[in-house]
Amino acid sequence: MGRVLLALVSALFLVMSVTAGTWTSNNFLYKPATGARGDEEKAKFDSGLNRVDSRLANEKWLNDPLYSGDLATAITTIGTAKAVLGIPAGNWPITENLTVPATLTLKFVHGAVITIATGKTLTINGPLEAGLYQIFSCTGTGKVEMKAEAVKVPEWWGATGDGATDDTAALRAWATCGGNLNLPKKTYKITAGIIVPQYAVIDGLGTIYQVTDTVEGLIVKDDVKIKNIELKGSGTVMAAGYHHLGIASYSVYDNSSSGTTAMSTYVGKRVLVDNVKFTGGWERCIILTSNCIVRNCTFTNNLAEAILFHGITNLATGNEINGLGSWGIDFNGGDSEASFNIIRNVGAATVDGGGICFAGLTTEKPMTGLRAVGNYLEDCGIGYGIVAWSQPTNGVLGDVVFANNTLIGKSTGVSRTAISIYPGTGSTTMMTNINITGNLATKWDTFIQGYYLLGGAIANNVGKTFTPGINAAMPFGAIDSVVIANNVCKEVTGGANTVMKIEGSNNNNRIVDNIGTGANVGLYNADSAGTKNDISGNDFSGCTTPIFLPVALAAGNRLEHNTGYVPGAALAPAVPASTVEVRNTKGYPVIVKVTAGTVTAISTGSVTGALTATGLTAGKVVLPAGWYISITYSSAPTWTWEGIQ
């Protein structure tokens, strides 16, 4: 009886607990807190159930019985509702092309891997949640496509980033996705080139380590951005016949110096390379074509060029280059600029190497619109500082500005030429509008070299410590309408050397107010045919022979007021017949001394046929360069000419 009573009491208590208040329990047992009011507790309980129901409604799991572990079934069942699909640990195969809608978020736990069969594509249009672990396995040509703005990391395709495991396959699959590609701060070893598709952006703090120097590193298509990462090459086995490339983007490039051809099918226009590190072992770090920008990058200990452009309208700015066998920056197309780069220890392996080169290799890429501004070059080996060379002989070169650059040659000895403008061997094509201004150079063989120049200025440049081995510190030839002014070239040494040499046929130039010291000859003028050149106001008094004229100046030139230069006795022409005019073609003023004879008038003037009598019948008359003189006489006098400044 006691047991029955106890059972009845227990049953009554249970019923009262479940039915406390006036609300239903939604099939859940519920025990209110002691003293709690039923309606208040019901509200709290229902609110909690609603949250649970909401989560269960919006977050699904691929291994739910409804989906049978099949992603296609899950997508069809969920439909267009916004939901989260959890992918639990295990391998989940994709055997047909499949698209994940934008409304579905895939959430991968560690150990969950979707395997895509060869020839099939998994397209993910919605968000994705995963850590730095593998979530995709692509068999054969199977691949994953994701939205461009989605951030993708190579670990999702199985990359380890430990610097020892070969991550080539993972990085290739990662890059194929395109769009926003993130490279975490790890080292990814590759043994073959990685193709980067159009419009892709590679960003991050990671390192791609190419240990096989017979293949490319990254091969980029149009409109690609490479930012912040590091590209590292081994350089331990440099096999002849290969080009070791950091970022390769070109149609066909023939390296005739080694007799080999490197080929790629990607053009690579409008590529941005920003704040990328290139370290050790590369032959050429970057080869790009047109409309590309390389900025704020660092290049260390590479074997040939750091940057090579095969196209027009390119920019290299703010880069730091240290340790190269050939050129720091090499342009093979016009409308291009190198500005504010720091280039050290380059051109050590070849005489045709150095800091910055503009060289037109074909007429399809005219070398016009060239800029080298604000660059700092130091220790340019046995090569050059900044050059503009137009090749082949029918090439075009013009609209050049080399300004405010600092160029320091080898730390011991001298380098070849600081700045060179030259049309190429055998070419006589005039190069137009050449402006070389405000540059500072020291420790070179030659300071500034220019041939076949039409128009422009070489002005306000300062240099010292030159040892010309062949010609002069500043050799010029076949120039027309060029201003060479206010340049300082000091400490030119090495025996019978020259500060400035003018050779060939030169016309309409102003060579004024230049200063040179230390050489055997200050200004060497070997031009016997040029006219209308003004050589005045120069100071070569610090040279053994300030001005040397091995041939007479042609008529129409001016050679006046050059400090340290005293023309001395000038070879006087024969005394002409009475009233016949004779012109001073010496290029500098002369004192004409008339003696003896029976003279009734001495006349001078700057225009023939309109001379003015001096009022003298004998004595000295100053005859400026280019002026005319006539003597009226009945008995011929004698005269002498003496050059003056």
Image (tube, rainbow, N blue to C red):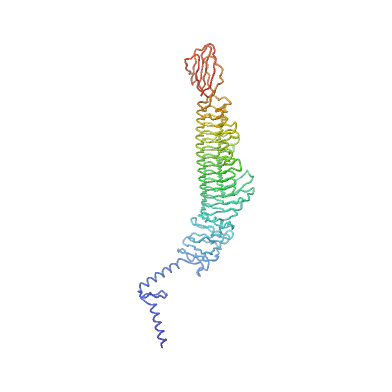
At 49% from the left and 59% from the top, the residue drawn is 125
Relative to 589, does residue 191 appear above or below in the rendering? below
Q: Quadrant of residue 119?
A: bottom right
The one of 192 and 106 positioned closer to us in this rendering: 192
Relative to 363, does residue 543 appear above or below in the rendering? above
Q: Quadrant of residue 17?
A: bottom left
Mark count: 0
For the N terminus, which image quadrant? Answer: bottom left
Is residue 566 visible in the rendered image? The answer is yes
Across and down, in percent, residue 286 comes to 56, 47
Relative to 25, does residue 299 appear above or below in the rendering? above
Across and down, in percent, residue 346 comes to 57, 43
Is residue 265 visible in the rendered image? The answer is no
Across and down, in percent, residue 571 comes to 56, 20
The one of 639 and 508 positioned closer to us in this rendering: 639
The one of 142 and 285 positioned closer to us in this rendering: 285
Relative to 336, does residue 181 appear above or below in the rendering? below
Across and down, in percent, residue 149 comes to 48, 55
Farthest residue to the bottom: give it.
1
In the displayed structure image, the side of residue 173 where residue 56 appears, left or right: left
Q: Quadrant of residue 473?
A: top right
